[in-house]
Image (cartoon, rainbow, N blue to C red):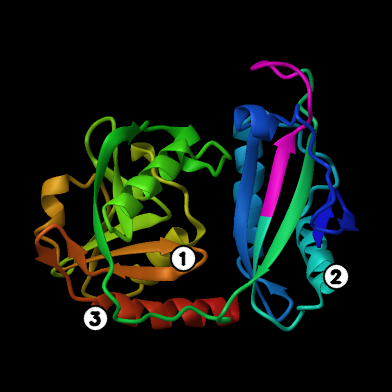
Amino acid sequence: MINYNGTIQPTDTKQLTFNNRGFKFGDALFETIRVIDGKVIFAEEHYLRLMASMRIMRMEIPMEYTLEFFESEILKLVEATGFKNKPLKIRFNVFRNDGGLYAPTTNDVTFYIQANLLTNPFYIMDDAPYEVDLYKDFYQAPGLLSSIKTNNKALQVVGSVYAKENDLHNCLILNTDKSVVEALNGNLFLVKGTTVKTPPLKDGCLNGIIRKQVLAILKKIEGYTIEETSISPFELQKADELFITNTVVGIQPITKYRKKTYTNSFSKGLLGKLNAVVRLG
């Protein structure tokens, strides 16, 4: 089942036209959200990011697009799936309505929501190998557009193909200044001694919801210095730990980058604190 602009419909219902702007131009936004036991996790954070992204994209925000509307439309779909007591991954999509070429004829929008089952309600971590390398065929542009979740994910797609071809679990993206920005599917954190670094939004990384939660947790841990600062590729092999954050996996430790191997003791402790926030949030 999907929720198409407030109407529950079968997943195979054909609603998108060949002129859909999300399909033709990537003129669309999305949020990936967890729902646990009928509760939308970090609902306000996802809602505010979506609204800010719509403003950046010059989309018209309908009056009814309140936080309450956002949550109720998600839960309407959850109820229709029959999986109210199951952990779910939600994709909330917003696209500009048909019309025009690069310049749209309208700024009005339509939304649709998809739901998929998750294996676990909370984040878990195992010690399986997780190897990454730099992806250097294309670069991320620094700036505000790179911080929002649009449907234009060509870099992430070709980067994922590269990772698969080279038996890697993921790749790290560079920006045009040759700083490490993020992973293909999440924000990057680097731990060296008692310093934890993550790239700043101005470098072109996603304004991640879990990134925000992890930064808030880190600021409460005594004895550690938290820096939102550019990361050079040369710093990667000097780090004690590297880990990736996103809404689906929570925290994913990196075990190997080129010839360097990493521990995961800090990220394991951090994951427990993140799960505690999820239970409260």
Give residue 144's position: percent from left, percent from top: 47, 34
Q: Of label 2 and label 1, which has the lower sequence position? A: 2
Instruction: Report the residue marked by disc 3.
Output: 265
Give residue 122's position: percent from left, percent from top: 53, 80
Give the alpha-carbon distance from disc 2 to disc 1, as whole Å. Answer: 30 Å
Packing grade of label 3 (10 A; few <14, some 14-19, many >=20) is few
Front in this rendered view, residue 203 or 85: 85
Residue name at image x 46 percent, y 65 percent:
213
Residue name at image x 62 percent, y 27 percent:
25
Instruction: Report which quarter residue 10 is drawn in.
Output: bottom right
Tell me the mark number nearer the camera, choosing from 1 and 3.
3
CB atoms of marks 3 and 2 within 8 Å: no
Mark 3 belongs to which amino acid? Answer: Ser
Quarter placement of the C terminus: bottom right
Mark 2 belongs to which amino acid? Answer: Ala
Residue name at image x 63 percent, y 42 percent:
29
Q: Of label 3 and label 2, which has the lower sequence position? A: 2
Element carrying mark 3: helix
Q: Which disc, if any, is residue 213?
A: 1
Instruction: Report the residue marked by disc 2.
Output: 80
Packing grade of label 2 (10 A; few <14, some 14-19, many >=20) is some
Q: Report the side of 85 relative to 7 (left or right).
A: left
Q: Report the side of 2 relative to 47 (left or right).
A: right
Whether residue 253 appears in magenta in the rendering, the answer is no
Residue 200 in sight here: no
Tell me the mark number nearer the camera, choosing from 3 and 2.
2
